[in-house]
Image: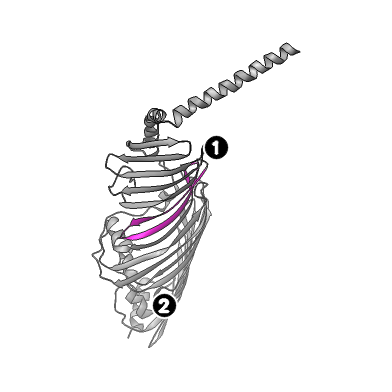
Amino acid sequence: MKTAFIRIGRYGLKIVLSALALAVVLYLILFTPWGNTLAKPLVQNRLSSLFETPISIDTFTLRHNSLHLHFHDSLNNRMQVQGQFSLITLNLHAFYQADLSKAGGLNSLNLPLKTSGVLNGGYGRMSAQGSANIFDGNLHYRVQLNHFDLSDLHLSRALNYQSLMLWLDYPHNSSTVLAGDIDLHGLDRRDVEGSATLQTRTQNFSPSPIVDDNTSFDFLSLFTDAQGKIQPFHLNLTLKTTVDELGILEQFAMLPLRGEANLKAILQGDQDRLVLDARTNLAKSSTHARVHWKRLRPSYVYLDVQHADTHALFHLFSKKSPTEGSISLNAEGTPKSIHYRGYFTSDLMRLNIDDTTTHEGMLRDLLKAIP
């Protein structure tokens, strides 16, 4: 019995000594200048893989309770992280700064900006909160990362619209500020819920030549991977916008727009069935529109316009109205057919049209109704 006890004691002592030796080795490797020198190339390779661009580390200092990391890319875009590190929880509380003034490299969006903020958390769950100088304005943000995948995003911004359009290669001369909030959740699960509220304030609007870049927007590409395969998703989004000068959107509409409008819209559904439901006061009307997609292809369109002001409607397209009156229109359409019925009133007469009216007859009656 005594011999067995001694043997167990010896084995226990060996285990304790081995654990202590391992701890000493890990400490030397991880938390000493010598160990940091050995780990630096590994960290540099990992950062290069994470950002998909060659990275050079200027400073890497890891202690059992602190971290200082400073690195740059081949274009001299720079990032720095410095703060407290917990060996027990493997959590980080640190301040960061980034100067991404050059397009490319670390700046994968080709969007010159400077940003700073605070990091909290570890590999499983990390949050970042900070502000960025971008488009001659300030952007405040909060992001949540799960295993380094973006989960939640909140943006609050007031940006110079002219600078934004210049970045999009659409030169624009108006003096406009774009403000609002964007709040999204579930991005990593592709089960996205959230809202966006946007407003524009235009002091001086100057029309710009409309640029025809001979490209079209492909809605399907937003939800497909590099091979063009639709990835499963679910959306429940709310959008509210107030535009005080629609002319700032003319480059996207490819039309010389004027006037103002409010819009409230809800986008709900998944990859099999997606529905957009929107209401607006465009041209002083009460307008309701619905668009359905099946497998991300348009399958049904509904439009109901009530009492659009004729003067405001012509002004919307930068035209002078030949008469005063109102227009109402109801239309439904599928990829195979479209049905519509309209009602026009002017100072002199009323005019009804529907999809049984020939286009020549509709135009002739419309001209008769205009004084």
Seen at 43% across and 71% down, the residue is 262
Asked whether, in this view, residue 188 is left or right of residue 114, the answer is right
Residue 280: say if magenta: no
Q: How would you rate the neighbour count of disc 1 (Cα within 10 Å): few for under 14, some for 14-19, many for 20 or more? A: few
Seen at 39% across and 75% down, the residue is 283
Quarter-wise, where is residue 169 in the image? Answer: bottom left
Q: Which mark is residue 284?
A: 2
Q: Is most of the magenta stretch helix, strand or loop? A: strand
Q: Please name whichever residue, 313 or 279, is drawn nearer the observer in this view of the structure.
A: 279
Q: Secondary structure at mark 2?
A: helix
Q: Please name whichever residue, 37 or 333, is drawn nearer the observer in this view of the structure.
A: 37
Asked whether, in this view, residue 263 is left or right of residue 323, the answer is right
Q: Where does residue 333 sit, x and y in percent of width and height?
A: 46, 63
| Badge 2 amino acid | Lys
Determine if residue 242 is in view: yes
Quadrant that contains the N terminus: top right
Quadrant that contains the C terminus: bottom left
The residue at which mark 1 appears reads as 88
Residue farthest along the bottom direction in this orientation: 348
Q: Which residues are magenta?
A: 125-151
Seen at 33% across and 80% down, the residue is 367
Residue farthest along the top direction in this orientation: 3
Q: Give the mark nearer the N terminus: 1 vs 2.
A: 1
Rendering colour mode: one colour
Q: Secondary structure at mark 1?
A: loop
